[in-house]
Image (cartoon, rainbow, N blue to C red):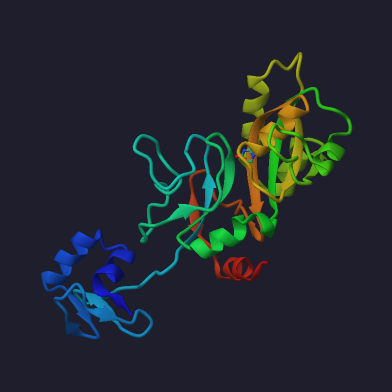
Amino acid sequence: MIRLDKYLADSGFGTRNEVRSLVKSGSVFVNEILIKDPGYKLNPDADEVSIKGRSVEYSEFEYYMLHKPAGVITASRDKNAKTVVDLIETRKRRDLFPIGRLDKDTEGLLIITNDGALSHRLLSPGSHVEKKYAAFVSGEIPDDIETHFQNGIDIGDEKLTLPAGLREITDIEQLLSEKNDSYIRERYTECISKIDSSENKIRIFEITLTEGRYHEIKRMFEALGGKVEYLKRYSMGPIELDHELSPGEYRKLNDEEMKNLLTSK
Ligand code: URA
């Protein structure tokens, strides 16, 4: 059982104060009976709530996939900067947060929800959920870089990084066709024009991590003499970035994705 004011606030009808006024003004019906008490207790699974004849859909949890663009910070709210949650314009819940973080300049898949238990499960150190990224890397890196990633790298933390997968991708065409990502060629061109190409060459790698440390991929390459010029996340556990979403766009997770997410280990 939950209070009517919480039910309405959770469903996106305003702050607790705003929905209290709404209830007191005599606009809210529960099972077709006018209720003016904001503290009225109802069962969200069984009771029907309507406002001026329109029925209210209760959302206990919301789950979105966002194609995070560069320049937006991975946080719920911030006084000065635009956050990934600000991009979810159709959100109903006020308690959304991103699962894990991507750097301000990193693009790609981010799951945004208010399901704390799911977030805990995906992020807890023991769960080893796989995250796949593509990186454009400049600089001199050793030929046996794959072995370094596999064995763990000293990035200045107490412990080496956990074994990570590394696969070199021959060229941008291969990346484009593997990921079906129409934005990636543009990013690659931007990257090439940014570096001094007479000195430097950009190589493309797919990286698979099972942990998430601050700037982890950037620091892994840096420890080996490379520099990550661009980074994008393509998947997190069973969820893959929908290539139909442009950077900045989002959608709700569909039933199949939800099933995979909630039943994944
Ligand atoms: N590793 C990084 O360095 N940055 C990210 O945003 C994600 C992984």
Which residue is pictured at 25% across the width and 60% down the height? 14
What quarter of the picture does the C terminus occupy?
A: bottom right
x, y (%) of residue 164? 77, 45
From this view, report whether residue 71 is shown above or below residue 55: above
Asked if 242 appears above or below 247 in the picture, the reply is below
| Apparent side of residue 121 relative to residue 250 in the rendered image (left or right) | right
Residue at the farthest left position: 25
For this view, does 163 lie left or right of residue 74? Answer: right
Residue closer to the observer: 122 or 136: 122
Estimate the x, y position of residue 238 in percent, counting from the top left: 66, 61
Quadrant of residue 93 within the rendered picture: bottom left
Task: Single out the residue that lies furthest toward the front.
Answer: 158
Quadrant of ligand 1: it is top right
- 192 relative to 237, above or below: above
- In this rendering, the count of numbered labels is 0
Q: Position of residue 50 (x, y in %)?
A: 25, 77
Q: Quadrant of residue 54?
A: bottom left
Q: Quadrant of residue 147?
A: top right
The residue that appears at 21% across and 74% down in the rendered structure is: 39
Residue pictured at 76% horizontal, 13% vertical: 198
For the N terminus, which image quadrant?
Answer: bottom left
Q: Position of residue 128 (x, y in %)?
A: 70, 56
Please tell me whether residue 157 is drawn above or below residue 236 in the rendered image: above
Residue beneath the point at 62% across and 36% down: 215
In this rendering, would 33 be left or right of 198?
left
